[in-house]
Amino acid sequence: MSRVLLESTPVLIVLALSLFFLPEPVFAQSPADCQAYAKRVEMDSGSMLGGVARGAARGAVFGAIIGDSKHAKRGAALGAAVGGVRRGAARSATYKRAYDDCMAGRVKW
């Protein structure tokens, strides 16, 4: 009896030690917690004004390359609209990704 116990002791020790190194279970947060987290991530990603300003600057440069000041003004207006839309889409995608990660339990609090 004691010989069987001595032979199985290393196996029991390894089994007992392995329980300490198993990853802990991750539970999903509540939807309200995840909404707050996603909103914080979205707000930290930058402002809409930055997208509009970058778009206007790029559009103005493009318009000036193509033509005169009238084209630069049109390019700035078009660039501001496109820049605002692109920034809005990027913020929306950032919010969705952060919310999904939170609900999946991939976010540590």
Image (tube, grey):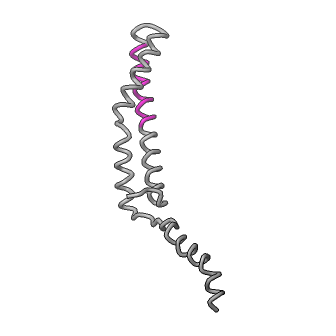
Using the image as rendered, state which of residue 15 and residue 45 is in the foreground.
15
Left or right: 18, with 8 as reference point = left
Q: Is residue 20 above or below residue 72?
A: below
Q: Residue at x 47, y 10 (%)?
A: 65
Q: Is residue 67 above or below residue 82?
A: above
Q: Residue at x 45, y 66 (%)?
A: 27
State which quarter of the image contains the N terminus. Answer: bottom right
Using the image as rendered, state which of residue 35 and residue 15 is in the foreground.
15
Q: Position of residue 73 (x, y in %)?
A: 39, 16
60 is within the stretch colored magenta = no
Q: Residue at x 42, y 35 (%)?
A: 87
Q: Position of residue 2 (x, y in %)?
A: 62, 89
State the image quarter where residue 71 is shown: top left
State the image quarter where residue 84 is shown: top left
**Total of numbered circles in the picture?**
0
State which quarter of the image contains the C terminus. Answer: bottom left
Q: Which span is picked out in magenta?
A: 72-87
Q: Is residue 54 above or below residue 108?
A: above
Task: Residue at the far top: name it.
Answer: 68
Q: Position of residue 47 (x, y in %)?
A: 34, 36
Using the image as rendered, state which of residue 75 and residue 51 is in the foreground.
51
77 is within the stretch colored magenta = yes
Q: Residue at x 53, y 75 (%)?
A: 16
Using the image as rendered, state which of residue 23 and residue 33 is in the foreground.
23
Predominant secondary structure, magenta span: helix
Left or right: 17, with 7 as reference point = left
